[in-house]
Image (cartoon, rainbow, N blue to C red):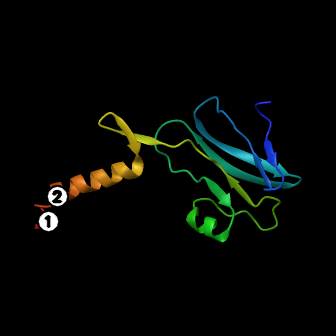
Amino acid sequence: NAGDPCRVPALRTVDWRITPERAGNFALAFGAGADRVELPLCVGGGLPRVGTLRGGTWLARVLYSAEPSIPSSSAFEALEIRYPKRALPMLGVDVHWLISLLVLSIVFALLLRPLVKVHF
């Protein structure tokens, strides 16, 4: 069934594939008994800032600090949303956002070079 989770007991994971019906900001709620943890889900266009991971190892909590941590008393260790990869159009070609940042940084550095009096 399309809505059924994929369980991997050896890895202690449960995965769902969801398909939103409309754009918007939603809260995915997960519960186990009285324990309830929510994670925001952004659907649609634009470039919103989204947190993709909540909980996990101490390093994951440092790297993905946009979301609050899950309490240690919770039945959940971590929640993660895997969004599709996003590309930004540059001159009609979809490129990774990091490459467009690099190209635009070089272009602006070369354009502003005479204003800040930088010489090679």
> As shown in the figure, which amino acid type bears the numbered disc 2?
Leu
x, y percent for residue 1: 80, 30
Residue sitting at 22 percent across and 54 percent down? Answer: 108
- Residue at x 89%, y 53% (from the top left corner): 33
Residue kind at label 1, given as amino acid type = Val
The image's mark for residue 112 is 2
Residue 24 picture location, percent across and down: 58, 37
- Asked which quadrant contains residue 76, the reply is bottom right
Q: Quadrant of residue 83?
A: top right
Q: Is residue 116 above or below residue 93?
A: below
Residue 68 relative to residue 15: left or right? left
Which residue, as the protein is rendered here, is positioned at the far front? 10
Residue drawn 62% across and 69% down?
59
Q: Position of residue 94 (x, y in %)?
A: 39, 38
Q: Nearer the viewer, residue 25 or 102?
A: 102
Secondary structure type for disc 2: helix
Of all residues shown, which one is farthest toward the right?
A: 33
Specify few, some or many for label 1: CA neighbours under 10 Å numbering under 14, 14-19, or 20 or more.
few
Relative to 1, does residue 54 appear above or below in the rendering? below
Q: Residues within 10 Å of mark 2 (few under 14, many from 20)?
A: few
**Would you place residue 3 above or below residue 38 in this image?**
above
- At a point 32% along the width and 33% down the height, the residue shown is 92
Secondary element type, mark 1: loop
Find out whether the residues at labels 1 and 2 contact each other: C-beta distance under 8 Å.
yes
- Which numbered tag is attached to residue 116? 1
| Residue nearest the viewer, comparing 10 with 77 | 10
Give me the C-alpha separation between circle 1 and circle 2: 7 Å
x, y (%) of residue 45? 49, 36
* Foreground of the two, 93 or 27: 93
